[in-house]
Amino acid sequence: MATTVYFAILVLVAANTVCIRIARQVYEVTDPDDWTSASFDCPRECFCPPSFPTALYCENRGLKEIPSIPSRIWYLYLENNLIKTIPEKPFVNATQLRWINLNKNKITNYGIERGALSQLKKLLFLFLEDNELEEVPAPLPRSLEQLQLARNKVSRIPQGTFSNLENLTLLDLQHNKLLDNAFQRDTFKGLKNLIQLNMAQNALRNMPPRLPANTMQLFLDNNSIEGIPENYFNVIPKVAFLRLNYNKLSDAGLPTSGFDVSSILDLQLSHNRLTKVPRISAHLEHLHLDHNRIRSVNSSLMCPPFRAMAGTHDSFSDGPRLRYLRLDGNEIKPPIPMDLMVCFRLLQYVVI
């Protein structure tokens, strides 16, 4: 029961973090007496809604430069423009900024003036997706909680980039050009509170080294990862969601213990090169093994041992917790072995 609740909480945290922040905007407005002045300091290129005086909407306007941001603004929307640079000057008075959306522009690392972003001491969310960045920008404000860098050209992470980002909970680097040599052993040093790390759709052949200990969600889909080092998960003892779909994992590339990691609740290994069902933990709830090269399911080997909790006598709650299993796209022929169903008594969905 506790695991199921934990699973639900994690899903809610991941899905609703941004939504909660947006919802709070309605209440985090300035004094009504300042609403009249909003129309006077509003940049002519943008829109300042009277009912939402802490927001500045400058998206889809063909802008080539960032306008001067009024001091009252918390939420800045500049997506889908032609902006190439982030100078310091437009943000001189914007000391209250919490949210900046610069997605779908033409920003390069050379265009970001040093200190332009780090001076924003209250910034929580920074969106720089779909730009032309070749490395993770730095320095960034210590207050930052989410950094979104998907669909750039990032191939480098300068040393010390994350050293002061102890409040960062989400780092999205998916769909970039990261190779294994982009990482050093101390690359992620400083990310003490990171929960979600997304490096899907890059060019990695190995698992990234020395991940932050608090990482709960690790997404590495669509790389070329061939193996996982022995004891790799000891460094990230809280990982609950692990996605390795569309890689090159084989049986020989897995550690001896497989994925027998008690923290993992959702494991996705679709579209790899596995011929056997890897060893799993009794705590695992969702397992995706579709589109591999598995020919048969050995129930006696697949069924994990489970240590009953003290004081419990329910055979269902004391057994393995697997609820969802995908095996389609392999070389397995139905029917499902009956002893598999006997082992995993909580199974609700099986696709074969």
Image: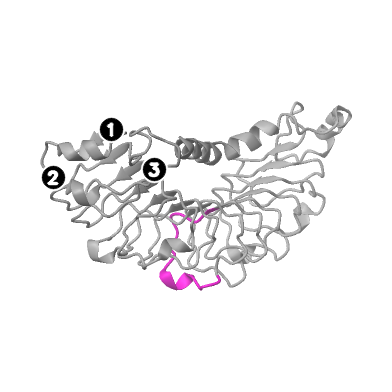
Kindly identify which residue carries mark 1.
349
Range drawn in magenta: 171-186
Residue under the image location 54 percent in, 61 percent down: 212
Vertical relation: 229 (above or below) 221: below
Say which element carries label 3: loop
Of callouts 3 and 2, the N-terminal one: 3
Question: Quick one: quadrant of the N terminus?
Answer: top left
Circle 1: residue type: Tyr
Of the pair 184 and 260, the residue shown nearer to us: 260
Q: Is disc 2 surrounded by few (<14), some (14 to 19) or many (20+) residues within 10 Å?
A: some
Circle 3: residue type: Ala
Q: Position of residue 142 (x, y in %)?
A: 70, 58
Q: Quadrant of residue 80?
A: top right
- Residue 313 magenta: no
Kindly identify which residue carries mark 3.
308
Kindly identify which residue carries mark 2.
332
- Magenta segment's dominant SS is loop
Q: Position of residue 141 (x, y in %)?
A: 70, 58
Residue under the image location 75 percent in, 59 percent down: 88
Q: Please identify, in this view, whether the residue under mark 3 or under mark 1 is nearer the observer.
A: 3
Question: Quick one: quadrant of the C terminus?
Answer: top left
Of callouts 3 and 1, the N-terminal one: 3
Is residue 100 left or right of 351 when viewed as pictured? right
Alpha carbon separation for disc pair 3 and 1: 24 Å
Circle 2: residue type: Ile
Of the pair 52 and 173, the residue shown nearer to us: 173
Of callouts 2 and 1, the N-terminal one: 2
Q: Quadrant of residue 320?
A: top left
Q: Is disc 3 surrounded by few (<14), some (14 to 19) or many (20+) residues within 10 Å?
A: some
